[in-house]
Image (spheres, coloured by chain):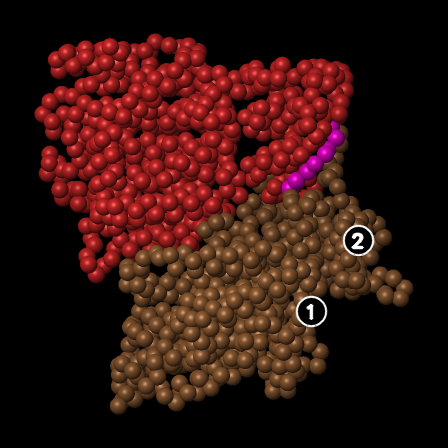
Chain colours: A brown, B red
Amino acid sequence: MFSRTLLRDRRLWLIVLLSALAFVVSRFAISGSTAISWVVNGGYWAILAATVLFARALWFSLREDFRGWRFRREHGAVLALVAVCGGLLLAHERYGFKVLADEELLVGTSMDMHYVRQVAYPIRATNIQGPFQVLQSVLDKRPFFYPFLVSLAHDLTGYRVENAFYVNTVLGFVFLGLAFVIGRRLGGSPWAGVLVVLLFAGLPLMAQQMTGGGFDLLNLVMLEAVLLLAIRLAERRDAWTQEALCYAGVLLAYTRYESALLLPFVALVVLWAWWREQRVTLSWPVIVIPAFLAFCLMQNRVFSLHEGSWELAGRPGATSVFGLQYVGENLGHALGFFFDTTGYQPNSPFFAAVGLLAVPFFGLWIVRVARTARTAAPADVAVALIGLGLFAIWALLMVYFWGQFDHPVIHRLSLPVHLLMALAVVVVGALFLRRRGWRLAAAAALVALVVYSLPVMARRAYTLTYSPAVEMEWRTDFLRRYPSRDYLFIDNDATFWIAHHIAATPAKQARLREEGLVYHLRNDTFSAMYVLQHFHVDPKTGVRTLDPADDIGPDFELDPVWEKRIETLFIGRISRITAIRQGGHVAARAGLVVTPPGAATPTRSSAEWDAAKKAYVDKFLKQLP
Amino acid sequence: MTIGARIQHASATLGPRARLLAFGVVALASVALGFLTFSVHQSQYLIEHYGYYTISFTFAWALIAAWRIAPVLGAELAAPARRERFQAGGVIAVCTVIAVLTVPITYKVLYDEMVLQATAWDMHFFREVKTILRGYRVDGMFVPFDAYLDKRPFFFAYLVSLVHDLTGYREANAFYVNLALMPVVLVQVYYLGRRLAAHGGALAAVVALGTLSLLAQNATGAGMEMLNLAMLLLTLQLGLIYLDAPDAPRLAAMLLAAVLLAQTRYESSLYVLPTAVVALEGWRRAGRIILPPSAIFAPALLIPYAIHNTYLSGTPLLWELHQDEKARFGLDHFWSNLHHAGLYLFSGSTLSTNSFWLSVAGILAFLFGLYRLWRGRRGWRTAPPVAVGLVAFGVVILGNLLLLMFYYWGQLDDPIVARLSLPTCVLLALALAYAVNVLDAPRRHLAAVSIGGAVLCYVWSGLIANAQHSALNTLDAELAWEQRYVASLPPGDRLILTNKSALPWMIHETPAIAIEQARHRVEELRFQLENHTFREILVTQMLRPTSAAGDYQLDPADRLPDWFVLQPVAEHRFGTRLDRVSRLVEIQPRPPAPPKK
């Protein structure tokens, strides 16, 4: 009966047609370069529209609730809990980039979104005309909802790299607040909410994310939003909530690659709601959703255009991106991560223990709900479907070639799994525990937080042993000591400097564009030129060997400025270029520009000055390394 | 009985004819004193020495007049519903906070703003309307040695000096005054909008103006535009309050606001005309002549403006004419300026401070308003006060814009000139409120559409312009770098020989003279150098590229004679130019002049 209703609905056919069209156009009808160009130039406006539509739908969905809302003492207690737990997470960690390249590129994309409204990160930029100008940008493979939010922060408060960290700090508090709501809602007791908040407050990984520039915390917040909206839709089945849920799903897909996996489960929740109502509810913003998702599909073509995007080379022995052969090893690494007690992993063994204990029961509960879908409570159906989505994400991570949770770069991928475990704890706990039980569980979580997590967070061993993060802190220290920011940096991690409005280029580019560096050194374009290099120390002889990737060639005379031992046998050094030789002779030397002494220089007309300026700017831009 | 009360009493005892006669006598005497009696030199002397006291007197009188109508103003402010006030306040706060956070708080119009700062400095310390040219620290006190009367009206400088008086001298006070004026302007736009439209329309006007990058730029600068705008809106607002129920206190408040407005910007004296029209219309509506003492003496309060104008007209050096220009206004500038105005108003560039939405929707709304005005022209006798006020002031705002089109430096797309379009932008925003209100229907949601359009344009280009526009002004960045560099040196007195204006150094109480002046004061410099009056003498110069390869050359205008021995100590690139700071090491004996052929 309902299937007939579905088949007869023209709007549904329209959405199917649009989906097919979006898929064909984004994947096949247009070339890869065209797809990328569309994402670069249109992506900002698409995400802006999606965000506005989400906010609009959310507002209309929640408006009635707000009208009846009154501040009570319990709300104050929850706010205090979230504030204290968030404060604990912030207390020991330093603001900065935590995952090399990923976070810098996200900030780079936010920079382009802020300055030129393009979804790309800058690789060449200048201020030769006064204002900051992006000369060349590249589309990143990473979904761009997080850079968009950071660019909004830039728009509203002025550009600064730290906005990326501040956005995550705010998201951290929002996450804890929503975690309480989920815990309370599914556990049936405020103490269940307290337990969930304490579990996450005791997870050092959260502290890293709240002070870093990654998109994982936003991913968690959007997962929570999808879960809560799915429950709301299942219970209320109104058009505004449906629209809000659909756009939360769209924005989730714009947040992290694998989160798009949740979209079918969101669609199932919507279909279930239609089935319960025996009618189809479709508004125009929902019908046009395929157009928004087309941008995700088009961006995904970066992977086919640039094979290196998968970073397979980073894991020797890996032959394919996904495969069942990785499952055993990945599960071992996951257990190693969850139950490590050395403090070198940003984990919480208590969280892992109760979570992994609850997860199988949660799976059984999902099966039970699926069997009784006709009579099950609406909220249970929604939780079961979204829970299945989280299981799917975990499964995908386990077949991923780089899915080792105990790797410093991969720790953060365990966050959705932690959310799944928290969900399992409250759903399963609700079957057994009453108020006193929840209190005891919350007390145990508090003890674990105090006894284990706080000292681990204070020691920060998991950060200090990850050399790229240590280097990032070193670079940040350099910025503090040399705040003028009018120098050029030769560093293979050039995006870090560019994001701080400092000219930068990789070592290889410097080798290839030596002529340009001579030109700029001679003309005093930059107050100084620095090069960041790494040396490996032979454990037997103590001899230092320059990392070949940092070698800029023998023509550069260097004056070491700052050296730092990053690891026991790995040293970083920042040097100032004092001269560049060509053909055995010094072609340019650092210092003030030399002007011809003696007789007065000729006066030029303004037209002559302008012509000279134009010629200089043209060559200046060509000579930028 | 106080003097004010005595005047009030005397005035009240006079009949309407006598008061009219008194007004005529004062007006004639004012014209004679302002324009005909004093020479350029005498005018300069009078303003320099008595300008501070005349503006203080006018300002104090205006405050008293405002105090007298405080209950009316309070009722006006409380007229909208509480929820509407809360929403409007929120929108205004958001617009202001975004402007504060996204636009660098720096000088936007160099030298103009510096001159105002320097005038405020002199008013604060010496109660004179002068701009310092040379100053030195003598016995610990920084004393001006040379100063001149600037061409700019000095109400803004006076207000800044007042803030200095009340909170202590600091350069930032001028910026704080302007920042505070942004919500003042937007609040007034809201209340004027409410006279034209319902809450939604008024909010549309506020958002249209609040998302104008040009307004944000001026609110974060140290210029007089924000005060001019605030005073213009205040005068209009007071005019409408007067027309609501014409009486003496309301007329006094409007007239005194107009007198202060006339002393805020050069061309703002033109607003005396619509103020007079509104005053006369009030008489007609009340059916009697209303002439309080402030009205009788208003022409006398404008005497300082007239004397200042006499000085300006007689001092062509202050006109800042371009090379080969002989007059400030000319017909031949019209088409070119109109073209530039079009380029500015409809620009989509992210470096331009316009609002595409305000220009397009505002002009359409303005044309619609004109059409409605034309259709309703026969009912002018019973037209609502807001129609009368807006027509009277609108004509002068547009007249000012028209006048600008004939001005030799009236290209609106020039960052220095764009600010002159602010009153027109306010007019367009108010027209938008009116059109939204008249054309709206339950299913149209025109207010929301208008607000959405303005916000979209802000996201499209305005927010980027907020961040980037001021970077076009590399001169300000050069000055800031020079001052940062000097501040980083070990403590001690320094003399700066600058290739720019000495003013930025003076307002920091650092002695400075222009390089041009240094060339003529060689012996004095040699004396100070030999006597170690200063810890060091620093010279700022500019180098420019002369070819694609660079081949930097010292700007000939910045060159000191060859017997000045300089040691370069720091250099920084700004755009294509290199800003250099050198230490004056020695002044060698001047070589004998070559024999004349």
Res. B25 visible in picture? yes
Outermost residue toward the right? A541
Q: What label sits on residue A342 in the rendered view?
A: 1
Q: CA distance from mark 1 to mark 2?
A: 45 Å
| Residue at the spot 90% in from the left edge and 64% down from the top edge | A541
The residue identified by callout 2 is: A556
Q: Earlier in the sequence, mark 1 or mark 2?
A: 1
Q: What label sits on residue A485 in the rendered view?
A: none
Q: Is residue B184 magenta?
A: no
| Residue at the spot 19% in from the left edge and 50% down from the top edge | B438
* Badge 1: residue crowd in 10 Å (few <14, some 14–19, many ≥20): few
| Residue at the spot 67% in from the left edge and 23% down from the top edge | B493
| Residue at the spot 89% in from the left edge and 66% down from the top edge | A540
Magenta segment boundaries in residue numbering: B566-573
Question: Does A472 sit left or right of A81 as displayed?
Answer: right
A493 w.r.t. B389: above or below: below
Find residue A261 and report its horizontal and vertical position in percent: 48, 78
The residue nearer to you, when weighing B351 against B170, is B170
The residue nearer to you, when weighing B195 against A473, is A473
Position of the C terminus of chain B by quadrant: top right
Outermost residue toward the front? A436
B98 w.r.t. A366: above or below: above
Position of the N terminus of chain B by quadrant: top left
Find residue B77 and report its horizontal and vertical position in percent: 25, 38
Res. B562 visible in picture? no
Q: Main secondary structure of the magenta part?
A: strand
The residue nearer to you, when weighing B438 against A239, is A239
* Badge 2: residue crowd in 10 Å (few <14, some 14–19, many ≥20): some
Give amino acid for label 2: Phe
